[in-house]
Image (cartoon, rainbow, N blue to C red):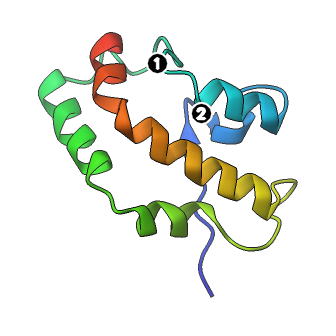
């Protein structure tokens, strides 16, 4: 029995960055989203680089186990969970550039 991990981004869940799950997934697939981070002035670029490397090197199975539960969690269905997993895999590919634009 896996525990539930809540992925938080900017103080709210990833699937709540817009008013609907579909809107959130669409926004998360945009390379320029978000354009800011509330902690951007508090993170030294050296440490950001270390965090980025850890995220980028995270194996797919780890991201999958943190996002897919094979049952609905609140209003997030397994279909939405798989969509989020695929979105996060794509975001990892351009994470370095994204962070450089923010910091």
Q: Which residue occupies 48% across, 21% down?
A: 31
Give coordinates of residue 34: x percent, y percent.
52, 18
Q: Are marks 2 and 1 in contact (CB under 8 Å)?
A: yes
Viewer-proximal residue, 8 or 86?
86
Q: Quadrant of the N terminus?
A: bottom right
Q: Which residue occupies 32% across, 48% down?
A: 55
Residue 82 falls in which quadrant of the image?
Answer: bottom right
- Which labelled disc corresponds to residue 38? 1
* Mark 2 secondary-structure assignment: loop
Residue 12 falls in which quadrant of the image?
Answer: top right
Give coordinates of residue 61: x percent, y percent.
44, 69
Which residue is farthest left?
A: 46
Please, is residue 32 above or below residue 65 in the view?
above
Give coordinates of residue 90: x percent, y percent.
47, 40
* Mark 1 secondary-structure assignment: loop
Q: Which residue occupies 35% across, 13% down?
A: 102
- Which labelled disc corresponds to residue 11? 2
Residue 45 falls in which quadrant of the image?
Answer: top left
**Left or right for 62, reference 57:** right
């Amino acid at each position: 029995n896996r525990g539930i991990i809540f992925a938080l981004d900017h103080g709210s869940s990833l699937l709540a960055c817009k008013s609907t799950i579909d809107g959130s997934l669409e926004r998360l697939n945009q390379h320029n989203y978000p354009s800011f981070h509330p902690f951007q002035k508090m993170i030294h670029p050296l440490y950001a680089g270390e965090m980025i490397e850890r995220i980028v090197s995270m194996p797919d199975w780890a991201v999958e186990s943190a996002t897919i539960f094979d049952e609905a969690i609140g209003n997030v269905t397994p279909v939405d969970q798989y969509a989020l997993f695929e979105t996060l895999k794509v975001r990892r590919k351009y994470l370095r550039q994204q962070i450089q634009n923010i910091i």
